[in-house]
Image (cartoon, grey):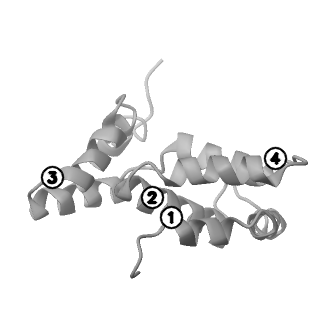
Amino acid sequence: DVPSPRENSPRALLASQPGAYDVLLELVDRSRSARVRENAQEILQLLPTRESIRHELVGLLEASTADPAVHRGKLRDLLGKGPAELVYALQVLDGLLSSQTGFEPGTERTAGSVATLRSSFLALGCARDILTTLPSGI
């Protein structure tokens, strides 16, 4: 079984390493060097979207539950982990709500499914929750 060139790419190999995203997010949050923070952020932007974050966000928006507060609480937990993770999760959420990129790599979402995610996002009151997680003055 020979891996495809895509699976052997540096970005795929780095993304598949346990803890790689966590280390980069930690560097963005805590490094004293502006250059290290910037480089870590650039590397994060080059990597494929962290599937666990995308999966959690899609699951929260697609699940139908009688209690929206449960979903909003999970969203707040996801966004409240740290400044770099907040920004990263917001970027993933923005991609889900503004594009037709599929949940699974290589798949396409329809305009209808993107609209459904947007409607769910608004119906759950997620926009208000996101605004409350942002630092004051933004």
Give the spatial CA distance, label 4 vs label 2: 22 Å
Q: Residue furthest bottom?
A: 137
Give the spatial CA distance, label 1 vs label 4: 22 Å
User: From the image, which quarter does the C terminus lie in?
Assistant: bottom left
Q: Which residue is mark 4?
A: 63
CB atoms of marks 1 and 2 within 8 Å: yes
Give the spatial CA distance, label 1 vs label 3: 22 Å
At x 42% / y 35%, what residue is drawn? 7
Q: Which residue is mark 1?
A: 133
What's under tag 2, amino acid-wise?
Answer: Leu
Element assignment for label 4: loop
User: Which of 131/34 is in front?
Assistant: 131
- In the picture, the disc for residue 86 is 2
At x 70% / y 58%, what residue is drawn? 108
Element assignment for label 2: helix
Between tags 1 and 4, which lies in front? 1
CB atoms of marks 1 and 3 within 8 Å: no
Q: Which residue is mark 3?
A: 31
Q: Residue furthest top?
A: 1
